[in-house]
Image: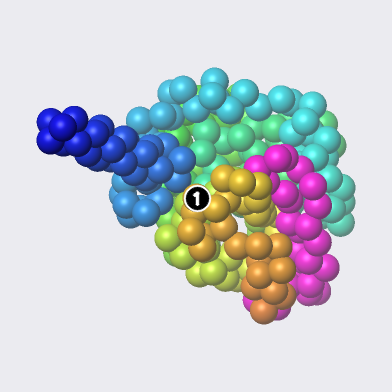
Amino acid sequence: MVYAVALALIVLLLAGIYWLLRWLLILTEGVFLGRRVVVWLYDLAAGRYDGIKKFDPDTESAFVTYPLRRRLKAWPAPLVLDVATGTGRLPYFLLQEAEFNGRVVGLDASAGMLEQAARKLAPFGERAALVRQSAQELPFAAATFAAVTCLEALEFLPDDAAALGEMARVLQPGGVLLITRRQGPEAAYFLGRARDRDALEALLTGLGLIDVRSQPWQVEYELVWAVRPS
């Protein structure tokens, strides 16, 4: 009887450790273990990342790059910043838009992800640039970019409010901000890091942005648009 109880406790303990590690390393991708762990995990996954995500060109154009280009039509050659660019997802698809005549800067903290991005963006030459830096301290002057984007990344940043403040700072007057908000059942795994819609929209408004609008996108994410006043 004692042996059976001890065995059951060991099984429960091992199961608890398994689910804790799964939550920390897989479900939340290391976010509760610190920025260095998050970057390390993305470095490890960089070579497989695009295969895992399986981005669809038509979907990317319909929901992200085409609407963004339309909002930038006042700029003949806009400069766009993509924060947490990963393997260069947004730069890659935006630069393929036939009527987009601008340039894109991709910023990320993971050297492995930027290495993959460099390979993908090489055909675009000087129209694409990559910077290794954290989102909380953007190395750019105020009012530099016509648009700033940050897709599927806010909940992984150490301080999303500080990062959004930096994104608003580097936007030109009239410039467009495009970010995503984590939603759905998995958002609960992030324990306060995934803001609800009202909270995120209020944060953006508090940063002085206007025309803040959320719209459906994916099961796990919705798109959020905002504008810096002219």
Residue 66 percent coordinates (x, y): 82, 40
Horizontal side, residue 169 vs residue 32: left or right = right
Q: Is residue 91 magenta?
A: no
Q: Is residue 100 visible?
A: no
Q: Quadrant of residue 1?
A: top left
Q: Residue at x 79, y 72 (%)?
A: 210
**Please, which residue is most extreme toward the front here?**
1
Q: Residue at x 32, y 52 (%)?
A: 33
Q: Residue at x 74, y 26 (%)?
A: 57
Which residue is more in the foreground, 41 or 138? 41
Q: Which residues are magenta?
A: 207-230
Residue 121 position (above or below residue 90): above
- Residue at numbered disc 1: 189
Q: Quadrant of residue 67?
A: top right
Crowding near the residue tagged with mark 1, few <14, some 14–19, many ≥20 C-alpha atoms within 10 Å: few
Which residue is more in the foreground, 201 or 179? 201
Report helix, strand or loop for mark 1: helix
Residue 137 percent coordinates (x, y): 45, 64
Residue 55 percent coordinates (x, y): 66, 27
Residue 57 position (above or below residue 224): above
Q: Quadrant of residue 178?
A: bottom right
Tell how many labels: 1
Q: Is residue 216 magenta?
A: yes
Horizontal side, residue 81 vs residue 133: left or right = right
Q: Residue at x 86, y 56 (%)?
A: 74
Q: Is residue 42 visible?
A: yes
Q: In which quadrant of the rendered image does the C terminus lie?
A: bottom right
Residue type at mark 1 is: Tyr
Residue 110 percent coordinates (x, y): 40, 42
Residue 32 position (above or below residue 106): below
Residue 183 position (above or below residue 114): below
Horizontal side, residue 29 vs residue 209: left or right = left
